[in-house]
């Protein structure tokens, strides 16, 4: 591909926001003789242009943003500055803010208990959104955050007015005094955007800000960002996936494609993508053909009748009635804060109120059923241990992604193996009584797996790694598939890109072939090739590596997403829809 939109005449540096007139980009510590991360980069951003960075892989796009933050070395350095417009004698990096929604929020390598949001029993879990994210808007900070009382400067009257405007436009006003752990993923994302705007940077970079936001919120956020960018308060650069729709007001694109960056007008780059054929077109990434065969004759896995959840006077779920049968495909949809995560937490057993929904089974089949119950796999919730539930339900969600441990030494193989029991660690490789070393395939403490069970688990791990890993993304030759998969299995989970980590957690959810699977924002952070491979596997479409069938005929799948085209199956396949609106649910055929 040729570079699109390369400047053909000198530009006034006073009107340049970003200036890389021709350079290679290296990691710090690596000499110029080492292959650069990005080669021959020509990128200039002028005042009045509206830019988005589009990445074919989450790691590549994030690396370009890291370059702008000064975390990589540009050779040769740009003349005068990388940010000519920000040169006034101060550090330009103090005027730049970056918010990424693809990275893990917690820094520790250990697991943390994300189910605390449902009970909020610990003192730190009572911290409100205002206290956690906007402490400068409080007259006095007490309690858990009291130690910050003298470190946080109270916002002045003008800043308070601006704060109130922003939270109102983002629908956060009524959420400010709720515990952070009680908020949805989309609500916390909106709060992070508002916080970044309140810092009043000259340049605000938002990587995948629309992921996880509901249909009603996305236009409101895009409208706000456009207004801010047009007023230069601040200037905004968006980060998008290749399959994402580009906002109408974006005029220029920087396409990150492997080690190359192609820049130009939106029309030029979109034409470049179409002509190259080297990248997946957004319309094809979420294709739902050919039709998949779905079996709806399975047993009842989830039976909810008049299920409700309340926190004091606040009702989160009201009289939910929902049955999920083996073999069914469901699309769960609802606005941010509608109760989707709470509903799933009842089924997975993570919510304390899952126990209060259940009632004893009738003494005989002739007796009427209870008026209110939650039955999971034909048993009341109170009669099924949580570890058993975790082994019967595969889950991919933003909360799991943030909580999953990134401890030192954890390999992809071991991360996938945790899926059989739905736990967060497995024994390391060990030596059997015969003296033969074997990789760990999970198993409960004190229980020894039979040879046939061990063999089945090893086969399953290889199956998901081959069909959902780099051998499927990059489509290597048949003779390279085994080698690529073996190398990937030994890679450290913490060293993977965001998209690769999310793909591994999808493998983890599917590896044990559980009866019920929840896919919550499953495509977030993945690039087009990862999504295409995963959808083919889930739909059981034939491929070069065997039959490629990922789902058993009795497995049920619930996809949680705001967009119809992100569901691997269509209405023609028999997909059912369950809609949540302000805690009230209904089935739509």
Image (cartoon, rainbow, N blue to C red):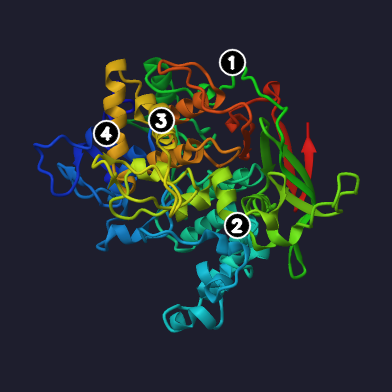
Tag 2 near tag 4, CB within 8 Å: no
Give left or right: position of 386 versus 69: right
User: In whole angstroms, how far apart are the C-alphas of marks 1 and 2?
Assistant: 37 Å
Mark number displayed over residue 459: 3
Give 428 or 86, whichever is nearer the viewer.
428
User: In whole angstroms, how far apart are the C-alphas of marks 1 and 4?
Assistant: 32 Å
Give left or right: position of 29 versus 17: left
Query: Total label count?
Result: 4
Q: Earlier in the sequence, mark 2 or mark 4?
A: 2
Q: Which residue is mark 4?
A: 487
Q: Earlier in the sequence, mark 1 or mark 3?
A: 1
Residue found at the far front of this picture: 434
> Who's the residue at 55% across and 74% down the image?
122
Tag 4 near tag 3, CB within 8 Å: no
Mark number displayed over residue 290: 1
Mark number displayed over residue 350: 2
Q: Single out the mark in the foreground, 1 or 2.
A: 2
Q: Single out the mark in the foreground, 4 or 3.
A: 3
């Amino acid at each position: 591909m040729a570079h699109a939109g390369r400047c053909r005449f000198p530009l006034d540096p006073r009107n340049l926001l970003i200036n890389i007139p021709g350079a290679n980009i290296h990691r710090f510590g690596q000499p110029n003789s080492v292959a650069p991360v990005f080669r021959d980069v020509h990128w200039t951003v002028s005042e009045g242009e509206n830019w988005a960075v589009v990445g074919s892989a989450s790691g590549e796009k994030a690396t370009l943003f890291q370059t702008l933050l000064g975390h990589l070395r540009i050779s040769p350095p740009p003349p005068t500055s990388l940010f000519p417009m920000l040169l006034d004698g101060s550090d330009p990096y103090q005027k730049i803010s970056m918010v990424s929604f693809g990275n893990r929020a917690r820094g520790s390598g250990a697991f943390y208990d994300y189910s605390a949001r449902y009970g909020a029993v610990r003192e730190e879990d009572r911290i409100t959104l205002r206290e956690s994210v906007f402490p400068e808007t409080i007259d006095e900070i007490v309690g858990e955050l009291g130690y910050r009382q003298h470190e946080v400067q109270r916002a002045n009257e003008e800043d308070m007015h601006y704060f109130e405007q922003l939270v109102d436009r983002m629908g956060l006003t009524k959420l400010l005094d709720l515990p952070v752990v009680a908020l949805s993923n989309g609500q916390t994302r909106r709060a992070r955007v508002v916080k970044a705007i309140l810092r009043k940077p000259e340049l605000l970079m938002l990587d995948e800000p629309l992921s996880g936001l509901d249909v009603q919120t996305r236009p409101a956020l895009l409208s706000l960002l456009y207004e801010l960018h047009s007023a230069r308060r601040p200037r905004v650069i968006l980060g998008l996936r290749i399959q994402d729709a580009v906002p109408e007001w974006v005029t220029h694109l920087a396409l990150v494609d492997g080690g190359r960056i192609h820049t130009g007008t939106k029309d030029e780059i979109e034409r470049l993508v179409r002509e190259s054929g080297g990248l997946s077109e957004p319309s094809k990434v979420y294709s739902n053909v050919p039709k998949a065969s779905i079996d709806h004759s399975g047993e009842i896995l989830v039976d909810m009748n008049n299920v409700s959840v309340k926190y004091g006077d606040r009702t989160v779920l009201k009289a939910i009635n929902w049955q999920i049968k083996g073999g069914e495909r469901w699309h769960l949809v609802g606005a941010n804060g509608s109760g989707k995560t709470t509903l799933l937490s009842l089924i997975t057993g993570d919510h304390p109120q899952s126990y209060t929904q259940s009632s004893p089974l009738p003494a005989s089949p002739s007796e009427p059923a209870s008026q209110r119950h939650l039955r999971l796999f034909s048993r009341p919730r109170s009669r099924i241990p949580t570890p058993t539930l975790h082994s019967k339900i595969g889950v991919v969600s933003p909360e799991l992604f943030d909580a999953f441990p990134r401890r030192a030494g954890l390999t992809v193989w071991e991360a996938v193996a945790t899926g059989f029991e739905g736990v967060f660690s497995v024994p390391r490789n060990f030596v059997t009584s015969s003296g033969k070393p074997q990789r760990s395939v999970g198993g409960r403490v004190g229980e020894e797996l039979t040879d046939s069970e061990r063999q089945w688990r090893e086969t399953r791990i290889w199956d998901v790694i081959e069909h959902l890993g780099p051998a499927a993304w990059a489509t290597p030759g048949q003779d390279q598939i085994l080698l690529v998969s073996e190398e990937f299995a030994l890679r450290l989970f913490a060293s993977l890109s965001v998209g690769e980590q999310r793909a591994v957690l999808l493998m983890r959810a599917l590896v044990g072939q559980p009866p019920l699977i929840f896919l919550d924002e499953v495509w977030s952070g993945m690039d087009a090739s990862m999504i295409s491979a995963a959808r083919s596997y889930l739909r059981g479409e034939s491929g070069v590596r065997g039959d490629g069938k990922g789902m058993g005929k009795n497995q049920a799948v619930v996809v949680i997403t705001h967009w119809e085209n992100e569901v691997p199956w269509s209405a023609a396949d028999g997909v059912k829809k369950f809609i949540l609106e302000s805690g009230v649910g209904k089935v739509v055929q």
